[in-house]
Amino acid sequence: MVDRIEISQEAADKQVIPEDLNSLAVGSYIIPNPQRRKTYGFLLIITALISQFIFYFNDWLSVTAGAVLVLFTGISILFINNTIEVKQSHVIQTVSSYIPHSIGYYSIALTFEFVKNLFFLKPVWTVIVYDHNNPPTNKTIIEIDASTAELVSEIYTEPIKNA
């Protein structure tokens, strides 16, 4: 079974492979701060308003429909909840009390869940945890709210067969 693609350091240097794609690169990946998304929302709103203003004086071309669509997209981006109180480095400590087995390998991903009644997205840490055995015999999937550290969904644990 192959875990990853193996390439030599010489081949990686020769092909100028970026560090984030290089399987030989060592180190952890830190998720960028989602607060930067608000910048894109403001840029879209400004673009929509400027384009509508510029083309308002041209009778032969109307960008109103496109400007409204871009404006709506920019406003909806501003309604994404970007507040993350549980930092990436503290996620595994936060979820460890909920996991019914030992902690071996784990994977952490930041996702956004749509809240229907409020019409916005909230950040959610999704964590997949395997036990310490080699090969692992148990797997748990857990989701916590990145703003409040509360459980978002039911904890899912299953035995891994034929690993």
Image: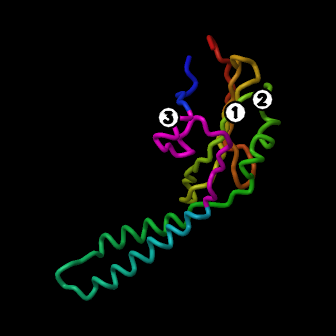
Of all residues, the one furthest to the top in this rendering is 162
Dominant SS in magenta: loop
Give me the disc on residue 2.
none
Q: Is residue 132 above or below residue 34?
A: above
Give the residue pinned by disc 2.
103
Of all residues, the one furthest to the left in this rendering is 60
Q: Is residue 88 magenta?
A: no
- Local packing at callout 3 (Cα closer than 10 Å; few below 14, some 14-19, many 20+) is few
- Residue contact at pointers 1 and 2, CB within 8 angstroms: yes
- Residue type at mark 1 is Tyr
Q: Is residue 15 magenta?
A: yes
Residue found 49% across the figure and 69% down from its top: 75
Report the front residue among 28 and 99: 28
Count the labels in the image. Answer: 3
- Residue type at mark 3 is Ala
Instruction: Describe residue 49's horizontal placement relative to residue 161 as left or right.
Output: left
Helix or strand or loop: what does disc 2 sit on?
A: loop
Residue found 53% across the figure and 30% down from its top: 7
Report the front residue among 28 and 71: 28
Q: Position of residue 154 (x, y in %)?
A: 68, 35
Quadrant for the C terminus in the image: top right
| N-terminal label among 3 and 1 | 3
| N-terminal label among 2 and 3 | 3
Give the residue pinned by disc 3.
11
Disc 2 to disc 3, how far (Cα)?
35 Å
Instruction: Describe residue 11's horizontal placement relative to residue 105 as left or right.
Output: left
Q: Quadrant of residue 79?
A: bottom right
Give the residue pinned by disc 1.
106
* Residue range (magenta): 9-34
Helix or strand or loop: what does disc 1 sit on?
A: strand
